[in-house]
Image (spheres, helix red, strand yellow):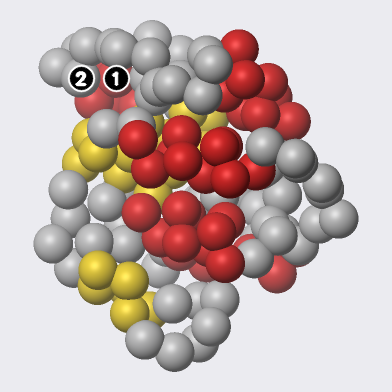
Amino acid sequence: MPDLKPVGIYREMYKRGHDDLPSIHDADTDQRLDDRDRILEYLRKAPEVFDVMEAVPNMVTGEGWIPGGSSLHSDGEWIWRTDSIEYLTARPFAIPDEFVEHVRANDYLPPNFDLRDEAFRAAYLRYF
């Protein structure tokens, strides 16, 4: 299984490492997606592949906490966190064009994939 591609994951979500990820401070965009709500729903529908019982500070509002924020979700090709969904919903942050095309090609329904695959597990743990 190839590396998972991140959606809405920013280097500031991690205490160290992940310098390869974009900064949340550069995530604002003027991208216009007529189907943005359907794309966000896709993010919510995909399975949680790694559940973390912690709350993380809300980096967008600077107030409050996001329960389970560092929990990971995936559709087998792309990966995102619970707080990613919150941030992409709250602000017009950029969503990768390749991901948008992927979601549309799947008719806004996350595909089934083998959650128990060891290569998949190794790929998603990179984001924890």
Q: Quadrant of the N terminus?
A: top left
Answer few, some or many: residues within 10 Å of disc 2's Cα (few below 14, many 20 plus, some between 14 and 19).
some
Establish if 119 lies above or below 56. above
Residue 23 spot, x, y in % from top left: 66, 61
Which quadrant of the structure image shows residue 16? bottom left
Against 28, residue 110 (above or below) is above
* Residue 15 location (% of width, % of height): 40, 68
Image side of residue 54 versus residue 17, left or right: left
Q: Residue at x 66, y 53 (%)?
A: 22
Q: Position of residue 125 (x, y in %)?
A: 28, 37
Q: In this view, does 52 lie above or below 34?
A: below
Gap between marks 1 and 2 measured at Cα: 7 Å
Dot 1 corresponds to which residue?
A: 120
Mark 2, residue position: 115
- Can residue 20 be seen here? no
Viewed as shown, does residue 22 lie left or right of 72?
A: right
Residue drawn at 62 percent across, 20 percent down = 104
The residue positioned 50% from the left and 76% from the top of the image is 59
Q: What element carries label 2?
A: loop
Query: Residue 55 at what x, y percent from top left?
Result: 24, 72
